Amino acid sequence: MKASKMDQRRYFRGVPTISYDLIKEFVVAIVVMGLIGLGLAAVFSSPDEPSVNIKSWSNADPVDFVTTASAELAGTSNSAVYGPPYSNGSAAVQAIGPFVPQQWAGDAMHLDTAQTFVLGPLSSMSGNDTALATALSKYKAATSDQQQTWITNYSNALANATVANGAVTVASGDYGPVPDLMAAELKLAQNGSLDGILLTSPGRFYQTNYSAPLLFMGDGGYLASLVQQQHLLGSQWGMMNETGQYPGQTWLWLYTLWYQIPPFNSASNVDLLVVLLMGFLTFLLAIVPFIPILRDIPRWIPIHRLIWRRSNYTPQERRA
């Protein structure tokens, strides 16, 4: 034991050393950062925006909800024509020539908006509602052309719809059973049942997949208006913003930057372009140590020495 200590002292003889209490430094750092965090939380608090769900949407803007539900039933909503992974459409497919990574996984979700958002929920509630069951049977028995005619006429009439006691009313017209279906859908949404139905995933104990209700709300105008008010749109640097004018994920500025400048801000495939560009920039950053000229810049322009300090400089290094 004594010989080992002597060897250790002899080995480190002449090496400049300083005492350093790592545990003390760690505790001090934790305490200081904790006090700063508590102080900032007490002064600025945090965003406390109420959550938005289908129930709150349908009660706040019944016409927008019914208009969106009609588009889901017609298969003309954004979700219905979006493309992979929700459907086999192509309205929002990101591609560069034949390079279409969005289609590699295919139609993974198999989203049928008419069945998922309207007909399925209504069918599950029609057992004790004879009028609703009759309306569903009439609609399903009609040809697809007849269904589209009813929905188109009803959707056009919604431009002049009125709201009374939470119910949406349109002028008389050739709508078939669509008004009855939409009235039942609105009632289902306003009492909160539709939220629960769209969250139900067969074979799962924990129902935490919010894809369906989020897609449904995203197809309407109500959620988009709230997003715009909170400056969360892509054109408002929304990826790095927080609700209520609070600072958010500021480290994402480099991603959101590209969405604001030409030619990205007018490109239909901007998402794919930004992903590829950021991947290329990340690759460049990773290989900096292997690029001969670039890796030598810190040695030629030693800006880092303004920040980095060592406590064990030799006299020769200090003079240099």
Image (cartoon, helix red, strand yellow):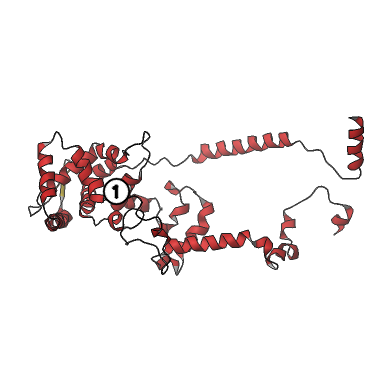
Count neighbours of disc 1 (C-alpha within 10 A) and say few if under 14, some if 14 to 19, many if 20 or more: many
Give the farthest residue toward the top.
1
From the image, tell me which residue sits under label 1: 216
The kind of secondary structure element at disc 1 is: helix
Using the rendered view, name the quadrant where residue 53 is placed. Answer: top left
**Rendered view: 47 above or below 151:** above
On screen, 186 above or below 299?
above
Residue at image position (41%, 63%) is: 100
Query: Viewed as shown, does residue 111 lie left or right of 28?
Result: left
Seen in the picture, residue 74 relative to 121 is either above or below; the reply is: below
In the picture, the quarter occupied by the N terminus is: top right
Residue 203 placement (x, y as % from top left): 34, 36
Judging depth in this view, the residue of 59 and 229 nearest the camera is: 59
| Residue occupying image coordinates x 62% and y 39% | 33
Residue 246 visible to an observer of this rendering: yes
Horizontal side of 137 relative to 10 (left or right) equals: left
Examine the rendered structure and indicate whether residue 317 appears above or below residue 18.
Answer: below
Residue 187 visible in image: no
Identify which amino acid the numbered label 1 is placed on.
Phe
Q: Is 189 positioned to the left or the right of 40 in the image? A: left
The picture places residue 314, in percent across and down from the top left corner, at 87, 52
Q: Nearer the viewer, residue 63 or 16?
A: 16
- Residue 238 occupies which quadrant of the picture? bottom left
Q: Position of residue 5 (x, y in %)?
A: 89, 34
Residue closer to the observer: 279 or 52: 279
Q: Quadrant of the C terminus?
A: bottom right
